[in-house]
Amino acid sequence: MQYRKEPLVSGSVYHVYSRSIAKYVIFNNAQDFNRLINILDLYRFNNFNFKYSRFLNLDKKLQAAIINEMKKSGQVDVQIIAYCLMPTHIHLILKQITDKGISNFMAKTLNCYTRYHNIKFKRTGPLWAGRFKSVLVKSDEQLLHLSRYIHLNPTSAGLVKKPQDWDFSSYQEYLGQSNLQLCSFDGLFDFTPKQYQEFVNDRKSYQKNLSIIRKIIIEDYAG
């Protein structure tokens, strides 16, 4: 078993990244993307004790009651600050709330989606290329630029022209254009939705050339 060089510390914020094996496409349509978004939403709560597939088989009213009770309790392993799902990989910005919170959250999330994908496509074996990678976010400036990098991933990859056209990231939440309440970033950033949109668009065409971005791109991480 391989251990991380440094333990993940509660109260700290991390860029968490996981890619598929051999750049295998793991999200083929909106249903697949939304499946993982829903998994992220539920498994961040440490008192969600269901297998996701069994939870889906519950009565809709009971599902809603369980979700409402969890959200009232606010008992989470991680705070999701931002995310972006890409066809072959995922980016998350997570604050660890409980000891081993990120590791527990990622294990449940990645395993749950693997089971779904393997059943759907009648395949076996692992879906993700090893353990997830994580890097400590050391400053508010790094956090701000990292959020922009993540939200610009779909445009950098040529999937959409404007980041708000990608439905599978938290960018629409940042602009106040989403009904989802998956992310929590109040108090972390001092901007209006319009100011954040201007900040993101200001670097859309050349974010790969920014030195601050190069330092936080996951491919350069050793962790």
Image: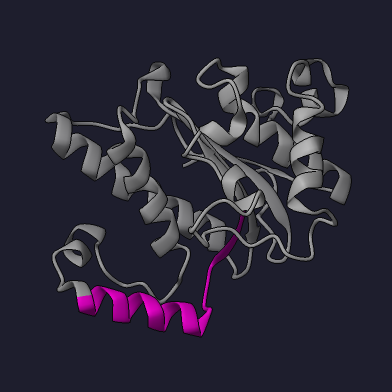
Q: Is residue 23 visible?
A: yes
Residue 189 lies in the magenta stretch? no
Q: Position of residue 33 (x, y in %)?
A: 37, 39
Q: Is residue 212 left or right of residue 92?
A: right
Q: Is residue 139 visible?
A: no
Q: Is residue 66 left or right of residue 106?
A: left
Name the main secondary structure of what is drawn in magenta: helix
Task: Tell me where the magenta segment starts and ends, as one range.
Answer: 61-81
Q: Position of residue 100 (x, y in %)?
A: 56, 62
Q: What is the basis of the colouring in this image?
A: one colour
Question: Picture quarter containing residue 4?
Answer: top right
Give the residue drawn at x 31%, y 44%.
113
Question: Picture quarter containing residue 95?
Answer: bottom right
On screen, residue 53 above or below 84: below
Q: Position of residue 182 (x, y in %)?
A: 52, 59
User: In this orientation, which residue lies closer to the viewer: 101 or 85?
Assistant: 85
Q: Position of residue 116 (x, y in %)?
A: 22, 43
User: In this orientation, which residue lies closer to the viewer: 40 or 166?
Assistant: 166
